[in-house]
Image (tube, rainbow, N blue to C red):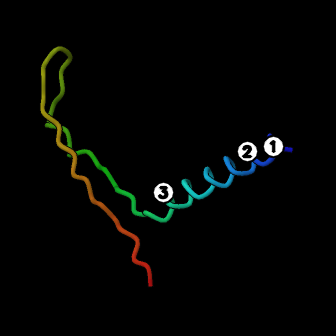
Amino acid sequence: MMTRKIGLLLLTVLLLATATAALAGGWAIITLDAPPGEIRAGEAWMVGFPVVRLALIHI
C-alpha cells in the first residue's frame, strides 16, 4: 500500500515537471549560411548559422 502511494506521488511529480517544461514553449529555426564558391578537401572554410528564436504567445 505504501509503495503504491510513493509510486503515485513520484508519477504526479514527474507529470507536473514535464508539464512545466512543455508550457515554457518556444523553439528555434537554425539555418546554415551558403557555402563559399568552391570547397576543397583539406582546406578550412568558415560557416555561419543564424538562429531565429520563435516564442509562443499565450492569449
x 67%, y 47%: residue: 10
Residue 36 in the image: state x and y as whole percent: 14, 37
Q: Quadrant of residue 2?
A: top right
Determine contact: label 3, label 2, CB under 8 Å: no
Determine contact: label 2, label 1, CB under 8 Å: yes
Q: Which mark is residue 2?
A: 1
Q: Which mark is residue 37?
A: none
Mark 3, residue position: 21
**Disc with the residue nearer the chain's start (3 vs 1):** 1
Q: Disc 3 vs disc 2: which is toward the camera? A: 2
Report the Cα–Cα distance between label 2 and label 1.
Answer: 6 Å
x 34%, y 55%: residue: 29
Residue 17 in the image: state x and y as whole percent: 54, 54
Mark 2, residue position: 6
Report the Cα–Cα distance between label 3 and label 2.
Answer: 23 Å
Residue 44 in the image: state x and y as whole percent: 12, 22
* Closer to the camera in the image, 26 or 7: 7
Residue type, numbered disc 1: Met
Binning the other alpha carbons within 10 Å of mark 1 as few (below 14), some (14 to 19) or many (20 upward) gives: few
Quadrant of the frame with the N terminus: top right
